[in-house]
């Protein structure tokens, strides 16, 4: 998009500065929350792909600064490939979330306790190869989801950034298998010209006959193999043959635009 | 619906025996015979996925892309047009495939660092190998089969590490650290000694496979690098990158150890990304494929293949050769190259000749008149090779040579009388071989500009023409057509001298053709219906085409103009294939560039444009570049290409943001339509599509915009408008009357509001008022709406209405004539459609205001696309949104509230079809007289809806997957059922 200094003039950018957020992304989480209220009464949360940390700031403010009762036992863990400068009440560390070891470390930090909210605003390096970029983005979400299945308590919520491309409906159907409700939401602070949107997955209800097991020698695809058997014949499983090509199950998640029409429009330039 | 033509990213190329090249083209493989430049076979490999790579072992192939893999024999591949029934799936994304030594088994490396060993014949998975604790995601990887027992797996991680492991023992050999960011490619040399890798950090690193040490770190690419390959017995490495170049590196043993040294750079694809590369080592040809869909071939020995390419002579060597003594400091002042050789003149007045046949220099004669100041020109007409020497004292010497370089008689000396001095002498010949025209210019503005007509066989002056010298005129190039001599000058001027009229009005002058540098060439292209077409180049990089009429006094029209990529432009011409070729200098390089197809033909490091040089055509498609560098005379033979320069030309390197088809068929071929594409890469291309084959051909790439295109649309049979960010909006005219092809010229740009325009013009629409004049509506990213009047007499835009919707970005606009009134529709990111009445004092007056009539929310968020159907009493909007839905809204006209008032609209019915797509709906287009609606969406499904009656909801007639990613625009040839779909690439469909 042009060579203009658009970001500098962006109203969300200015507002983020004003309110002390490290990135304009903060408003995406806030506007999603306006619609879905998933930030109320949180005890323990994980913020994946968190740098520079504006989502963690939002979480910290909601859970600690604005909290009324006891903050004892509350916990925020934030992870990113990039280093992050400290944020009050947030435990940060630097790691690759697609690496199985990272997930074990997060689990250790939580001890035996479960989290009630996991979010991921991750975006990998974009190569320009549309199908690869989309796959890697979905794998990032699947890594986040892998952790989520290990750490999220039943009825907990999960929010992640997606890019609505060719195969996004395959992801919807997988998420629908784990959560009661899956919605694709676009906050007004996310540019309409970008494919970015967020999946809001509410009410975690894993299949009864599946229990997640972290194993350093298992890839994300393998991890979910037994979980998605019902909808995903893709997996190799124990078969000794590569399966023939077949269309995968696809469902379209309902779309919700959030943030209210009176909020700023991120596509506008002045 | 059936897709007939596809151009889009090509991710891989692979040479196979017998001069064949396999090219991955979306889900297809195209097989070319490279030497014959022929497409032999097209075959669909996968149903939806793109082909990412190909492994070959004798007559077996393992083709992969995404999670798909196909194990096929050569026979299966070439025996059918579709082998997608053989498509199988891997559990994880495949990053590489390779055959084992026997060719019986295939290794599939997945992005989670697992290798599946698959039996080729049965498809059985024999083994699954992986490295303990290393299952994080990979961007790249490769498998190297050294022998039966040694198979290396090279895994490129996202954290900068390259994990090299042994497939059979399942042990890690190295985790090579040094790169920053994701590893985008890693490969091992055939001898197993080296690992080469590249990453996000733009460097290439060479590692020792046996010690794990980094041997060399090489920089050069200006963006990320996607692919590498060792060749020439592991002594060279070829790399391709996001920066559109392909580079050659040599692996050299130096005092420092083993180093990667940059050897050559080829500009091969359009912005941006070269994905695939392979080398045919026997022929030393490389093939590359890119995001632009181009398959490019590179002769890796272009300037060394025949070993006769380069000759160099210093003045001492020539002296010895000719057996003469030159004065101290004597240098070559000028030269001209003929088929037989070179004639040169030194600062000592020595006239020398070099003949190619016997590689010998001889002194022909010495002429004291041409001692210090001299100019050497030459022409070849019929069998006459004539050199013209001149000095600043009005002396000319004409010498004629035979085909073999022998001087014919003594030469002709003449003095041009009546001039104080001469600073420039140039010559040209027209269609009439018997005459050479020589222009003689004096620095004195009061002196005449003289043109001599000289008989090419006798060298006698037949005629002399004297003209008053035009003001601030310094001649720089010349050509002739009939009795008109066209002379280019500095400061972008061309003067036309009528030989039948030496009076003052016999000189016609064209000023300000371009920005203002020297006119470097003028060439006659063709003549059609008394319009003579000339190509004119300018040193500052601009070129234009002038249509000149000579009858009823001279008149001209610029029908094409453009700027070349960069550097100095010295000349341009059409080659045998009908492509426009430019040449000139880019910093220290001499280049030749195919402007029609947008690729560099050749380059040569010659030091720059300031030196003495000349390019001379010899034989068929051969050229000789002669230049002087470091006081040496260099002679470079540019041979006819040994291999085709490309197999398919490709289109834009980045997303096509909009496209528009000319409403009428081509003037020169009724089976073809002109269309324009506007891309994120900031260029506009003028193309044709053949309605029978779907084939697309590009003629011109206009580089006027400096920001990515937003919209481009034909507004009449020959006018089109394009707009983009930075408030750029250009009005263009297309001229399709000449045989060579269509031309496109920017007529006017819209005035910008501020010095530093920062707004995006999101969309526009026009309503013609009189012939050629129109009202234009523009909508902006800051919610403003403007209306303009374009007057075609004065070629001016004048603003008449400026207003604002709200604060959100407006995405679309349409001007709608409803009965006697003009309405303006806008749609915006807030999900609303708003209809305004355009206020005018009377029907013919210019707009002076906009009055909102109705505002209706029709989508949850941005209304991305709109088309409108107007009936007797309704306006129906068909819209597509960011909310994945299509909405049909019927607005009923309501009568004017009072006499003299205006009618309005209210929403009478609407139907929102939500979730019709799984991602943003990006375009809506009514066709077949409004009875059908075509939609495209990011989920890559093209849908056709029945819109014949306004019965809601819309009924889906047909839907089909398109291989064009980021599907964003479409257009339909009304009545001819050809559809163009644009995105990352372009496809032609037939309905
Ligand atoms: C858009 S930013 C997140 C912004 C953040 N939510 C905020 O509000 O400040 C995306 C982040 O994803 C991170 N990321 C991408 N791939 C990752 C991976 N594999 N593991 C961890 N972080 C990753 C990037 O480093 C980047 O900082």
Image (cartoon, coloured by chain):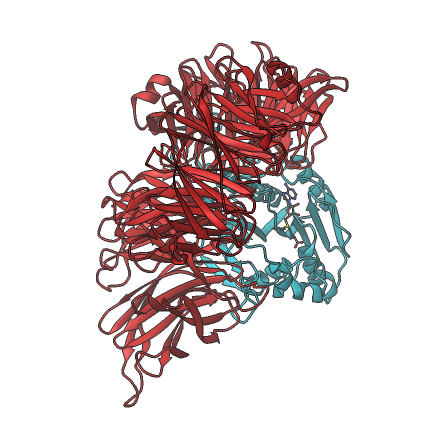
Q: Nearer the viewer, residue B641 or B58?
A: B641
Q: Nearer the viewer, residue B803 or B745?
A: B745
Whether residue B55 is visible: yes
Q: Relative to B247, is B437 on the left or the right?
A: left
Residue visible at 68% across and 18% down in the picture = B252
Give how far across and how far down residue B273 sits, in percent: 53, 38
Q: Relative to B835, is B259 on the left or the right?
A: right
Q: Nearer the viewer, residue B873 or B405?
A: B405
Q: Total of numbered circles in the picture?
A: 0
Whether residue B937 is visible: no
Up the image or down, B764 lies above or below B977; here it is below
Q: Quadrant of residue B213?
A: top right
- For the N terminus of chain A, the quadrant is bottom right
- For the C terminus of chain A, the quadrant is bottom right
Give how far across and how far down residue B371 sits, in percent: 62, 32
Give the chain ID for the cyan colour.
Answer: A
Q: Nearer the viewer, residue B572 or B452?
A: B452
Q: Quadrant of residue B169?
A: top right
Give the chain ID for the red colour.
Answer: B
Give how far across and how far down residue B505 sits, in percent: 39, 58
Give how far across and how far down residue A197 sits, in percent: 52, 54
């Amino acid at each position: 998009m042009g060579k203009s200094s658009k970001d500098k003039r962006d109203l969300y950018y200015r507002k983020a500065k004003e309110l002390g957020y490290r990135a304009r992304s903060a408003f995406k989480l806030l506007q999603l929350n306006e619609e879905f209220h998933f930030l109320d009464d949180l005890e323990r949360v994980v913020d994946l792909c968190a740098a520079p940390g504006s989502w963690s700031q939002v979480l910290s403010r909601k859970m600690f600064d604005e909290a009324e009762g006891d903050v004892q036992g509350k916990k925020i863990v934030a992870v990113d490939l990039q280093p992050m400068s400290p944020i009050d009440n947030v435990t940060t560390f630097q790691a690759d979330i697609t690496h199985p070891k990272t997930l074990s470390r997060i689990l250790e930090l939580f001890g035996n306790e479960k989290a009630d909210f996991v979010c991921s605003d991750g975006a990998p390096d974009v190569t320009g190869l549309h199908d690869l970029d989309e796959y890697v983005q979905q794998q990032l979400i699947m890594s986040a989801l892998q952790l989520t299945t290990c750490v999220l308590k039943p009825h907990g919520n999960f929010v992640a950034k997606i890019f609505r491309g060719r195969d996004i409906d395959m992801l919807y159907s997988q998420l629908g298998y784990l959560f009661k409700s899956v919605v694709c939401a676009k906050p007004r602070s996310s540019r309409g010209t970008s494919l970015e949107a967020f999946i809001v997955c509410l009410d975690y209800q894993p299949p009864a006959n599946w229990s997640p097991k972290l194993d350093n020698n298992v890839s994300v695809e393998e991890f979910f193999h037994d979980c998605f058997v019902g909808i995903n014949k893709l997996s190799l499983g124990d078969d000794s043959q590569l399966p023939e090509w077949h269309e995968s199950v696809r469902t379209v998640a309902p779309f919700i635009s959030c943030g209210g029409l009176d909020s700023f429009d991120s596509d506008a330039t002045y | 619906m059936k897709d007939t033509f596809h151009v889009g990213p090509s991710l891989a190329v692979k040479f196979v025996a017998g001069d064949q090249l396999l090219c991955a083209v979306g889900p297809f493989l195209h097989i070319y015979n490279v030497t014959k430049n022929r497409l032999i076979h097209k075959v669909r490999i996968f149903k939806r996925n793109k082909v990412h790579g190909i492994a070959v072992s004798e007559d077996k192939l393992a083709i992969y892309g995404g999670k798909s893999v196909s194990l096929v024999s050569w026979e299966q591949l070439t025996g059918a047009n579709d082998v997608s029934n053989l498509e199988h799936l891997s559990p994880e994304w495949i990053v590489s495939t390779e055959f084992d030594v026997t060719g019986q088994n295939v290794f599939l490396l997945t992005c989670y660092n697992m290798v599946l060993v698959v039996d080729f014949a049965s498809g059985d998975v024999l083994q699954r190998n992986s490295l303990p604790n290393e299952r994080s995601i990979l961007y790249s990887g490769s498998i190297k089969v050294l022998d039966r027992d040694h198979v290396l797996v090279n895994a490129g991680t996202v954290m900068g590490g390259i994990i090299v492991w042994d497939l059979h023992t399942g042990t890690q050999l190295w985790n090579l650290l040094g790169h920053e960011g994701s590893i985008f490619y890693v490969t091992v040399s055939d001898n197993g000694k080296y690992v080469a890798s590249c990453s996000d950090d733009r460097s290439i690193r060479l590692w020792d496979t046996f010690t794990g040490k980094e041997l060399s770190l090489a920089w050069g690419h200006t963006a990320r690098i996607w692919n590498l390959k060792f060749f020439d017995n592991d002594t060279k490495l070829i790399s391709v990158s996001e920066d559109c170049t392909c580079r050659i590196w040599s692996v050299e043993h130096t005092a420092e150890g083993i180093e990667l040294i940059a050897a050559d750079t080829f500009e091969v694809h359009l912005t941006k990304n070269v994905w695939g590369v392979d080398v045919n080592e026997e022929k030393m040809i490389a093939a590359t494929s890119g995001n632009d869909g181009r398959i490019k071939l590179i002769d890796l020995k272009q300037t060394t293949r025949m070993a006769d390419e380069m000759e160099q002579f210093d003045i001492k060597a020539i002296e010895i050769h000719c057996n003469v003594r030159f004065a101290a400091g004597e240098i070559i002042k000028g030269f001209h190259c003929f088929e037989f050789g070179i004639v040169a003149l030194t600062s000592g007045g020595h006239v020398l000749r070099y003949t190619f046949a016997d590689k010998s220099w001889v002194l022909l004669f010495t002429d004291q008149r041409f001692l210090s100041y001299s100019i050497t020109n030459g022409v070849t007409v019929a069998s006459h090779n004539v050199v013209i020497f001149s000095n600043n004292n009005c002396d000319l010497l004409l010498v004629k040579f035979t085909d073999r370089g022998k001087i014919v008689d003594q030469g002709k000396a003449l003095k041009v009388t009546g001039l104080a001095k001469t600073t420039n002498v140039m010559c040209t010949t027209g269609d009439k071989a018997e005459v050479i025209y020589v222009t003689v210019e004096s620095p004195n503005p009061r002196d005449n500009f003289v043109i001599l007509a000289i008989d090419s066989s006798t060298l006698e002056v037949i005629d002399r023409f004297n003209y008053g010298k035009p003001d601030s005129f310094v001649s720089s190039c010349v050509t002739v057509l009939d009795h008109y001599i066209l002379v280019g000058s500095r400061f972008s001027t061309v003067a036309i001298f009528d030989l039948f009229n030496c009076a003052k009005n016999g000189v016609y002058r064209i000023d300000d053709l371009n920005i203002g540098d020297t006119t470097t060439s003028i060439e006659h292209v063709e003549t059609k219906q008394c319009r003579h077409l000339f190509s004119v180049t300018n040193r500052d990089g601009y070129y234009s085409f002038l249509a000149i009429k000579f009858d009823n006094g001279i008149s001209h029209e610029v029908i094409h103009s453009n700027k070349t990529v960069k550097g100095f432009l010295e000349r341009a011409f059409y080659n045998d294939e009908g492509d426009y070729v430019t040449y000139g200098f880019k910093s220290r390089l001499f280049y030749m560039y195919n402007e029609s197809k947008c690729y560099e033909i050749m380059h040569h490091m010659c030091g720059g444009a300031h030196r003495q040089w000349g390019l001379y055509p010899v034989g068929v498609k051969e050229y000789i570049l002669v230049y002087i560098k470091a006081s040496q005379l260099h002679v470079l033979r540019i041979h006819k290409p040994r291999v085709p320069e490309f197999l398919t030309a490709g289109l834009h390197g980045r997303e096509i943001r909009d496209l528009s088809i000319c409403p009428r068929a081509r003037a020169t071929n009724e089976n073809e339509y002109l269309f324009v594409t506007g891309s994120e890469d900031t260029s506009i291309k003028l193309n044709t599509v053949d309605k029978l084959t779907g084939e697309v051909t590009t003629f011109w790439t206009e580089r006027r915009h400096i920001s990515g295109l937003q919209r481009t649309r034909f507004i009449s049979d020959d006018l089109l408008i394009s707009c983009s960010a930075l408030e750029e909006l250009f009005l263009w005219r297309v001229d399709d009357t000449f045989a060579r092809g269509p031309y496109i010229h920017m007529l006017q740009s819209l005035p910008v509001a501020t010095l530093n325009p920062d707004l995006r013009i999101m969309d526009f629409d026009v309503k013609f008022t009189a012939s050629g004049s129109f009202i234009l509506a523009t909508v902006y990213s800051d919610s403003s709406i403007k209306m303009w009047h374009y007057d075609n007499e004065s070629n001016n835009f004048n603003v008449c209405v400026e207003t604002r919707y709200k604060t959100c970005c407006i995405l679309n606009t349409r001007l709608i004539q409803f009965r006697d009134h003009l309405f303006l529709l806008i749609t915006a990111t807030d999900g609303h459609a708003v209809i305004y009445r355009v206020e005018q004092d009377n029907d013919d007056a210019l707009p002076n205001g906009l009055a909102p009539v109705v505002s209706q929310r029709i989508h949850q968020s941005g209304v991305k696309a709109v088309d409108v159907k107007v009936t007797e009493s309704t306006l129906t909007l068909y819209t597509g949104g960011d909310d994945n839905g299509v909405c049909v809204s019927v607005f009923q006209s309501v009568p004017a509230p009072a006499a003299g008032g205006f009618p309005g609209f209210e929403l009478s019915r609407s139907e929102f079809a939500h979730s019709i797509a799984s991602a943003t709906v990006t375009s809506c287009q009514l066709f077949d007289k409004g009875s059908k609606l075509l939609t495209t969406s990011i989920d890559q499904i093209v849908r056709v809806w029945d819109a014949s009656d306004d019965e809601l909801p819309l009924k889906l007639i047909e839907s089909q997957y398109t291989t064009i990613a980021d599907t964003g625009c479409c257009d339909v040839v009304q009545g001819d059922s050809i559809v163009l779909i644009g995105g990352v690439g372009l496809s032609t469909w037939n309905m």
